[in-house]
Image: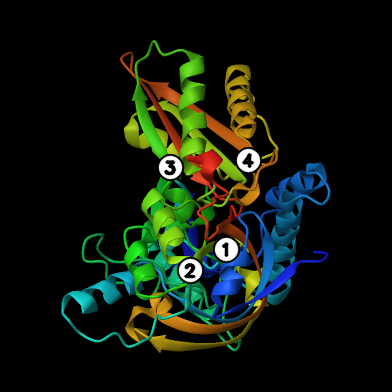
Amino acid sequence: MGKIKRISSPFSEKEIISLKAGEMVLLSGIILTARDQAHKRIFELIAKGEALPLDLQGQTIYYCGPTPPGNRVIGSCGPTTSGRMDPFTPEILAMGVKALIGKGRRSEDVLQAIKKEKASYFVAPAGAGAYLQKKVISSKVLCFRDLGPEAIYELEVKDFPLVVGIDAKGKDIYSRLK
Amino acid sequence: MTRKIQGTKIKETVKRLCVVSGTVLRDDIYRALKASYSAEKSGSRAKEMLKVLLDNADIAKKDGLPICQDTGMVAVFVDIGQDVVVEGGYIKEMINEGVKDAYREADFRKSVVKDPILRKNTGTNAPSVIHFDIVKGDKISISIMPKGFGAENKSKIKMFNPTVSPLEIVEFCVDVVKDAGPDACPPYILGIGFGGTMEDAALMAKKALLQPVDIKSKHKHLAELAEAIKGKANDLEIGVMGLGGGSTVLGVNVAAGPTHIAGLPVAVNVSCHALRGASAII
């Protein structure tokens, strides 16, 4: 893909602020998967006043439910539709999450929260789970194992290809498609 | 006159079709993605991403990995010759056993919940949604379509008045694509069903996706509608991953059936670019 900017997660504030919507980047480092049921579980625990089994501060969340690993590190692992997580996302960002990875558009509330918290939303190549599988170095279940593919996995990725979807200034590549 | 077919044969066939469809992208779709790749401007993000999709299909086939992690809920289309007798098992159970075996052994994701409200995963990806038809002859034809829900969620149906203009129909179908936007893995393939009753239109729409995307309808008026929808949808310039460019819709497959004097159902089934499927005749 020619000369592409390389970035690493967890992010420094300086790095987040330097990203521009529409830019292609290669991400290396640690990301946490969480999709519908993991979000629901986090909010149920908070509602009950219970402690979360993970620290979200500074983390990157990837909306993904991989296929079973078999004898590999992980199975196919592309992004799922981000919009379904919109109702949860402003609070997730308020808890300290710095970056989100998924596919598709986000709500205005999410965009404003990204701006307020100086965070970032990335889109990953959608429907390319086998390709992205090759970019994952290690994988382990962090919590909510009972949720199966919807458990929270900690992934270490290397050169995971992304496009900056919404940057910390609130610029959105999909504003023309809303 | 009757021909006996063993239930285990049906089970094995369904299993094989599930594994193949989940890991080997349909030839027609691969060709269409390749054509889109060639058509996009060199150096554009859209071209880069189409390359990723082609590489993805190559990796999936070579390594036996799922093309997409959403290995879908399986729709099974079964045409049973009326001279066939199935022995050694109930056909519906045999089909679902085949799905279970495939999803377990090929390490596909199990994405089916037993109840839409309670949402407990069955853990097997069964049951599948099975559409039976009785046809002439002594064979069983089985087509498998595992479909992810990112795209299924964007599908729509509308019951039009019979006096609706072709332009209004085109606009409705294009609006479905606009609503899907970049969310459901464009470039899309649309299956569109015109006519019948409400459920018939929806079924025709999905079945239309079984047809190759590079084949036009034999009926001129339907081919023209499909062409108009494809043209206007591509004018939206959503593009692969919503990054712009001309690859918004790879194909529009249409089907039509008799309907009532008072109505014109139009169902649009949206498929992502990873339109998967496989067929066999027993």
Q: Nearer the viewer, mark 1 or mark 2?
A: 1
Q: State the residue at coordinates (60%, 35%).
A: B252
Instruction: Say which amino acid is labelled 2.
Output: Lys
Q: Can you tell which mark lies on residue B11?
A: 2
Of residues B253 and A150, which is closer to you in this image? A150
Q: Are marks 1 and 3 on the same chain?
A: yes
Which residue is most to the front?
A14
What is the tally of numbered marks visible in this picture?
Answer: 4
Q: Position of residue B48 (x, y in %)?
A: 75, 56
Q: Are marks 4 and 3 in contact (CB under 8 Å)?
A: no
Q: What chain does mark 4 sit on?
A: B
Q: Which residue is mark 1?
A: B17
Q: What chain does mark 2 sit on?
A: B
Q: Are marks 1 and 3 in contact (CB under 8 Å)?
A: no
Corner quadrant of residue B53: bottom right
Q: Which residue is mark 4?
A: B248
Q: What chain does mark 3 sit on?
A: B
Mark 1 surroundings: few (<14), some (14-19) or many (≥20) residues within 10 A: many
Residue B95 showing in the rendered view: yes
Residue B75 showing in the rendered view: no
Q: Position of residue B177 (x, y in %)?
A: 51, 37
- The Cα–Cα distance between marks 3 and 2, rounded to whole angstroms, is 30 Å
Of residues B154 and A7, which is closer to you in this image? A7
Q: Which residue is mark 3?
A: B155
- The Cα–Cα distance between marks 1 and 2, rounded to whole angstroms, is 10 Å
Mark 2 surroundings: few (<14), some (14-19) or many (≥20) residues within 10 A: many
Instruction: Say which amino acid is labelled 3.
Output: Ser
Q: Secondary structure at mark 3?
A: loop
